[in-house]
Image (spheres, rainbow, N blue to C red):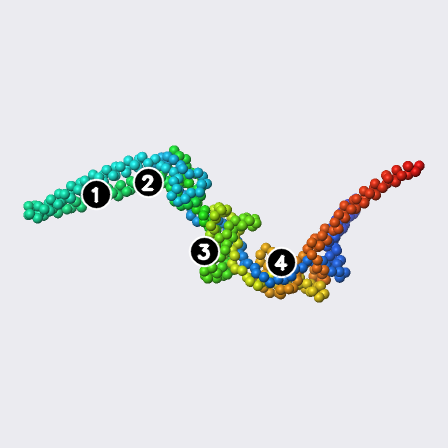
Amino acid sequence: MKKKVLWIVIGVLSLAAASAFYFTRRETPETAAGRRGMDSGRPVPVVAATVQRGDIEVIVTALGTVTARNTATVKARVDGLLQRITFHEGQLVKAGDLLAEIDPRPLQALLDQAHGQLLRDQALLGIAQIDLERYRSLLAKDSIARQQVEAQEALVKQYQGTVQIDKGNVDNARLQLDFTRITAPLSGRLGLRQVDAGNIVRATDTNGLVVITQTQPLMAVFSIPADSLGAVVKHVQAGESLQVEAWNREGKQRLATGNLRSLDNQIDITTGTVKLKAEFANANNSLFPNQFVNIRLRVETRRGATLIPVAAVQRGTVGTFVYVVNPEDKTVNMRTLTLGPNTAEIVAVEKGLEPGEHVVVDGADKLRQGSKVEIASAEARQAGRKGPPNAEADGEKRGERQKGSAPAAARAGKNRE
């Protein structure tokens, strides 16, 4: 019994090993065809591109956060009953626009009281000044003591000080009365309302009435690697204005275009980056505070660079390389490169290629040093991958015709009978 179980186990393990060997060695038709082509010396179809000389923009990309240039919480500056609100949530306002009103009657009464006090003290000052003039004339005739004149002069100065205090009280009361009209401290967009009309508001309230954010212009803060800082600083010190673009999260839509405004004064040692700030006019209100955007900082335009498609670049144990097509014998050579700045489609080559050479951009996965190639167009190679068009459909149609021929032959035999 034990031997029987042992043989069953051995059989199962053998079957599993055979299945694993089969699936690991199985090749796709395209891979097998490419391998047979390389082994047999037949040319491998590839798509090649010509190395060109042209201009490329040096762009530094980063993730940024949109920030408001100015943000203010609109608060009441005096205590009182919130009588009226004149704004709508999300409204764009200008500096000085009326936002709300507080009941002005208590402060109007204080202003009247201060004004009355001023009038009374001004009258007392006038009487004291008249008496002073009379005392001085009597002193000139030696009809009064000098001490009495000096006392009257001090009394006049006292009343003058009192009148000055009263004027300050009047101005303060008038200012408090003006504070019952709450206006926008800056131009921007209003947020959500924090309090409703009919409530008692105080100057000590922390939430305020509403938050106003300046949205034109807006700023964006982003970080770039310290290695890219040298080129940026060079242009900034030369007085050049570097262009900055803000793109959406997917990087497919440009939201706004602005300029670099400032750089931070130190590098973050934890990330090895430095913060920069850009300004956007935001005329179409496409940016909002605290919005995440993709930043593209255009540092410079490199003229006369050696350019190749990004698809031609391969990476391996030797580093970055491309397959260069020899135009004489149609073979390829693997050549290592030193790359420069790149965009989404092209990359600059600092060292390793010359304009006019041809590099493989499609089909490099089937190549090795010295492989013979056949340069084809991208459309032809794509069609070759898909196989002959409508081959399967033609086979089905032929099968249907064969199936249909049997009943027809049977009918013909019956007619002959």
Q: Quadrant of the N terminus?
A: top right
How far separated are the C-alphas under marks 1 and 3?
A: 53 Å
Residue of label 4: 309
Quadrant of res 261 = bottom left
How far separated are the C-alphas under marks 1 and 4?
A: 86 Å
Mark 4 lies on a secondary structure that is strand
Horizontally, residue 66 falls left or right of residue 204, namely right
Question: What residue appears at the point 49 percent right and 59 percent down from the top-left corner?
Answer: 232
How far separated are the C-alphas under marks 2 and 1?
A: 24 Å
Residue 114 numbered mark, or none: none
Q: Which of marks 2 and 3 is nearer the N terminus?
A: 2
In the displayed structure, 51 sits above or below 186; it is: below
Quadrant of res 237 = bottom left
Closer to us: 150 or 309: 309
Residue of label 1: 162
Mark 1 lies on a secondary structure that is helix
Residue 178 numbered mark, or none: 2
Q: Are marks 4 and 2 in contact (CB under 8 Å)?
A: no
Horizontally, residue 220 falls left or right of residue 350, namely left
Residue of label 3: 262
In the displayed structure, 85 sits above or below 51; it is: above
- x, y (%) of residue 236? 46, 59
Which circle, 2 or 3, is nearer the viewer? 2
How far separated are the C-alphas under marks 3 and 4?
A: 34 Å
- x, y (%) of residue 239? 45, 60
